[in-house]
Image (cartoon, grey):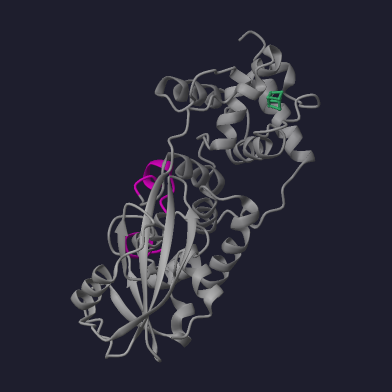
Amino acid sequence: MPFFSPEKVTSALLEWHIDNPRDLPWKKTRDPYLIWLSEIILQQTQVSQGLPYFLHFANKYPTVKDMANASEDEVLKDWQGLGYNSRARNMLKTARIVAQQYDGVFPDDSAGLETLPGVGSYTAAAIASFAYEEEVPVLDANVIRVMSRLLGIQTPPSNAANKKKLLDALDALIAHATPSAFNQAIMDFGARVCRPRNPGCESCPLNDNCSAFASGMVHAIPFKAPKKPRKNRYFHYMVIGDEDGLVLRKRQEKDIWQGMYDFPAIETASTELLNSDQIHSFLRSHFNLTNYQVVKHSTDSQVLSHQQIHGIFYTIKSHGELKTGDKGPFTLASYENLANFAVPKIIDCYLKAKSIHL
Ligand code: SF4
């Protein structure tokens, strides 16, 4: 591409950033713990949604050792509402590794950072450049979009050859700047100027270096692979309770919402209601419960990135002693204590809507 000048692009990006700073708390620090925390929260999350969570975590756990001392239940409760809970579980694993094996100090280069759970090459590059000024470019969704458009890449940017092209071009750009300043500038530029929809091309300071703009291909880049259809799943939830509380189930299996709590459930292939034999057999085998009344049922759904969850709720009033056993996934939660459990959105909505008390 004859008109792409790394020096000019970098200097235009830095000038633009000086005139358009973004006032966010994690930009005012060099503390790798707070930078790491912000990067984990902002993976797959918009800044406006992630900011209150960042402030909450930074306030409740001011150091990585404070976080390392928290229980997984507590961290998942703090995380509730952000989604992609494997991030929270990995965050806690990393906090414990840094606290115990590194005495509370994060590794000071991207290679060391990348060994930590939940820290991929992008997150490692962000922490290493912002905290330690390592000359390593970040490749987040904003940067991929800017660079794919500047270079006019019309195939999926995720393929290995394109990724190398993007990284080579970024290496040439970052060489003309302080690493943290460059990475912050291009990430913010992608978020605010070279936006996914309605990018500000006409007044863009890079438009005379932009291949997509020159060829009229801006809206087709970055190339998007067709999305796979979402998988439908049908959870028939038994909301079993008595005067004292409700039975919750800790989701222990490797699946959505791992580590969070929902209700005991039977998963089927449709919304067709369970018959009384199925309910009876489930209650007897898991809780030795034979004296009960199915009061009512209701439905709700929750859309996840790759799945749509259909919840069919059966409210079951126990007239016998509710036994959940000492081991296993079930626990009897008192009504007063229900709010302390980390639950998926579909369960949270159900509990709030029903203000349940059997
Ligand atoms: Fe992005 Fe448009 Fe600027 Fe090119 S000209 S970098 S597509 S905003």
Q: Is residue 304 above or below residue 347?
A: above
Picture coordinates of residue 11, whole percent (x, y): 71, 27
Determine whether 295 is above or below 2 in the image: below
Quadrant position of residue 235: bottom left
Residue 288, above or below 124: below
Res 26 visible: yes
Stretch of the chain drawn in magenta:
98-115
Q: Nearer the viewer, residue 150 or 218?
A: 218
Determine the quadrant in which ligand 1 lies: top right
The residue drawn where x is 32% and y is 66% is 265
Quadrant in the picture for the C terminus:
bottom left
For the point 61% across and 55% down, which residue is it? 26
Taking depth in this image into account, of 313 and 63 the one nearest to the observer is 313
User: What is the residue that sits farthest to the top in this orientation?
Assistant: 2
Left or right of 322 on screen, residue 140 = right
Q: Position of residue 191 (x, y in %)?
A: 66, 39
Look at the image and say whether residue 109 sits in the magenta stretch.
Answer: yes
Identify the image quadrant of the N terminus: top right
Quarter where residue 7 is shown: top right
| Image position, residue 8 (x, y; %) | 70, 21
